[in-house]
Image (spheres, rainbow, N blue to C red):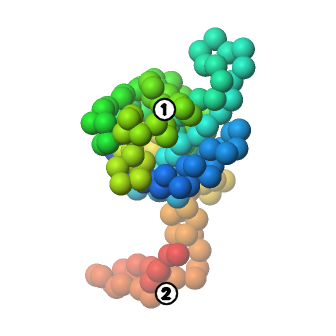
Amino acid sequence: MSCSKLSTTEKYPVSVRMKIPKEKLLIENQKDEWQIQSEDYIVQGLPGFLYFVGIRCEIFENDERFNGRCFFLLLGFKKENEFKMNVSCKVTLPALDNVWTWKVDHQIEHPNLALRIPGLDTESLFDPTMKWFVNDIFVFVVEATLTVERKKCYGEIHKNEISNCCECGLSLKLWDRDDKDFAFVVDKKELKVRFLIV
């Protein structure tokens, strides 16, 4: 019998508070284009999927939406596995007590979602009257819900199909190997297991 694949939709909340010192932004802002991003974060339950947040400055010429140097707050993705994902996102700038939201209702193909904050540009960022900084730190919070459609496997799987099966491939490959560490014996039945998988 082969693996039957059923689609399921699961929601994964993510949240990152990023703090960037004013000095670092001043240094980066001497370049025409630049990007500062956080470390990569994992999402429990989504193997091979990482996300980060950041800020980017980019120059646009002859673009209908943007002109000149523009700032964007980023929610970026790095993924090994293909799946459909919708994103609902909220960005908060605690210094201004403002919230912006955006939603992407299609399969994400681009590695970054970029949100342009009204009034945030190269001139206003360092204008003391705009109050983007708190104690010389630029702080923003990104909270998002990733709604992911994935295929799960049910039923027995032929060994040839293990690598094609979406979620159960690793466990089945490990199950078939003979390098288990010890065994439980219950009712004269032996179950061999590994001590640790790293």
The amino acid type found where label 2 is placed reads Asp
Residue 64 sits in quarter: top right
Q: Residue at x 58, y 79 (%)?
A: 178
Left or right of residue 98: residue 67: right
Closest to the observer: 161 or 104?
Answer: 104
Closest to the observer: 180 or 85?
Answer: 85
Q: Is residue 54 above or below residue 100?
A: below
Nearer mark to the viewer, of 2 and 1: 1
Q: Residues within 10 Å of mark 1 (few under 14, many from 20)?
A: few
Q: Residue at x 45, y 83 (%)?
A: 195
Q: Residue at x 42, y 48 (%)?
A: 138
Residue pointed to by mark 1:
124
Residue pointed to by mark 2:
181
Q: Secondary structure at mark 2?
A: loop
Q: Residues within 10 Å of mark 2 (few under 14, many from 20)?
A: few
In the rendered image, residue 7, in percent from the top left (x then y), is placed at 44, 35
Cα distance in 3D space between marks 2 and 1: 62 Å
Q: Earlier in the sequence, mark 2 or mark 1?
A: 1
